[in-house]
Image: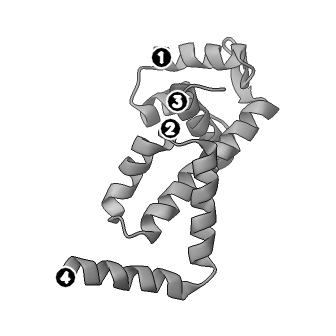
Amino acid sequence: MPTPSMEDYIEIIYNLMETKGYARVSAIAKALSVHPSSVTKMIQKLDKDDYLDYEKYQGFVLTKKGKKVGERLVYRHELLEEFLEIIGVEKENIYNDVEGIEHHLSWNSIDRIGDLVNYFKSNDTRVEDLKKFQNENNEA
């Protein structure tokens, strides 16, 4: 099971590889606001734990295990963003809030949030009713 720090790296690497087809140490360092040497150390750890295959001076690719974890982490992140949007969290707060909570929830909690998001999405009036309820409570 990856640590929260490992999850952050896997998620960034997965996103970069999906969008650009590759991930460079410099791009990962910039995305995570860390030094390139820290990225190199984590890449070596992720290689050791079979999340990616790393060849010194050649680069790296996610393993099947790394891709699976990356997909799940991106799903979790996007689901939490969607959930916070549905419940009315202000857009400028959503990204930081997700970053703050995503590593602290169990996968069981994530699955239940997924159920709730799907419940709201299955009937548009549910979201409207929630917003109406929130407005009534804010006026009181």
| Res 90 label | none
- Crowding at dot 1, Cα within 10 Å, few <14 / some 14-19 / many 20+, comes out as few
Residue 140, given in percent of the width and then of the height, sits at 18, 81
Q: Looking at the image, tell me whether mark 2 or mark 1 is earlier in sequence order.
A: 1
Residue 5 visible in image: yes
- In the displayed structure image, the side of residue 92 where residue 50 appears, left or right: right
Q: Is residue 131 above or below residue 70?
A: below
Which label is found at residue 139?
A: 4
Q: Viewer-proximal residue, 119 or 21?
A: 119
Q: Residue at x 36, y 85 (%)?
A: 132
Q: Is mark 3 on a helix, strand or loop?
A: helix
Give the labeled residue for mark 2: 103
Read off the residue under disc 3: 4
Type of amino acid at the residue the image marks with label 4: Glu
Q: How far apart are marks 3 and 1 (CA)?
A: 15 Å
Single out the mark in the foreground, 4 or 2: 4
* Image marks 2 and 1: residues in contact by CB distance under 8 Å: no
